[in-house]
Image (cartoon, rainbow, N blue to C red):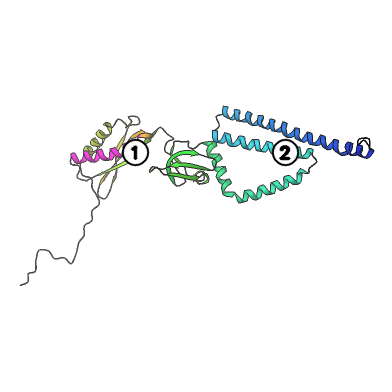
Amino acid sequence: MDFLSDPQASDIVSGYVIPWGIKIITAIAIFIIGRMIARAVTKGTVRLMEKSEVDETLRNFLSKIIYALLLIAIIIAALEQLGVNTTSAIAIFAAAGLAIGMALKDTLSNFSAGFMLILFKPFSNGDFIEAGGVTGVVEKISIFSTIMRTGDNKEVIVPNSGIYGGTITNYSAKETRRVDLVFGIGYEDNIKQAKQLIEQVLNADARVLNDPAPTIAVGELADSSVNINVRPWVKSADYWGVYADTLENVKEAFDANGISIPYPQMDVHNPNAQTGSSDKTA
């Protein structure tokens, strides 16, 4: 007996097999074509971000997020084509996402801070900064943390939330920096001579900029010294070299010309001490 000639079998084929076959084929087509469209949209978005010079780390991350969201929408559309009640599934996913978000609160905080750091760029790779309680050179900025190298060559991984939520000092942001120094001389020393010696030291250093010109001025009449403020301008890369060399060269110039650099002294008086006489015993 022919299966298709059976009225009951024919009803099954026409009532279930064919409609479900069409639904399955349609769902598969939606998924395949939708995924192709998602890839095309993601690539187009990446190209737009490249033209806008969006940071590569942020570009890669956003492209993955966009593709994932589009893929979820495609899967939901395919499931709806099969007659699946996606409303409940969406509610379950939303509840699960909320629970995961609460559990990963610190991680999400680092993520949002990393997003802002990459977007607004308060510093870049290679900059010398002070942030998150760490001072060093930025080696890598990721979406969750920033890797820094300290002056003694230690690698420190700082959570982005600790950086973006606090004060950021970028020592490399400007091409020039001012070196702030203070030299104390004795009250009996010649102030003009001391200032001339400091000026000679600065003029002999090619790293010291002429514009802005260095400032050399008396800043304070302290308890034991006359303090002279010295403010030369240098390129940011020369800061520490000029700082150390100026301290050394000014000290040597003062020593060679008899100008003293006072240091705190304490006079101790003993009221019980006897002076001018001595006890002799036989």
Q: Which mark is residue 93?
A: none
Q: Quadrant of the N terminus?
A: top right
Q: Magenta residues, as a range?
A: 238-263
Left or right of residue 109, residue 247 in this image = left
N-term-proximal mark, 1 vs 2: 2
Q: Secondary structure at mark 1?
A: helix
Q: Is residue 81 visible?
A: yes
Looking at the image, the residue that sits furthest to the front is 1
Left or right of residue 210, residue 279 in this image = left
Q: Between 169 and 268, which is closer to the camera in this rendering?
A: 169
The answer to if 259 sits in the magenta stretch is: yes
The answer to if 172 sits in the magenta stretch is: no
Q: Main secondary structure of the magenta part?
A: helix
Estimate the x, y position of residue 246 in percent, counting from the top left: 28, 38
Q: Between 105 and 208, which is closer to the camera in this rendering?
A: 105
Quadrant of res 86: top right
Q: What is the distance, in whole Å, between disc 1 and disc 2 at their CAs? A: 59 Å
Quadrant of res 189: top left
Looking at the image, the residue that sits furthest to the bottom is 282
- What residue is shown with label 1? 240
Please tell me whether mark 1 or mark 2 is closer to you in this view: 2
- What residue is shown with label 2? 75
Estimate the x, y position of residue 211 in percent, counting from the top left: 35, 29
Residue type, numbered disc 2: Ile
Q: Is residue 231 visible?
A: no
Classed neighbour count for the residue bearing mark 2: other residues with Cα under 10 Å, few (<14), some (14–19), many (≥20): some
Residue type, numbered disc 1: Trp
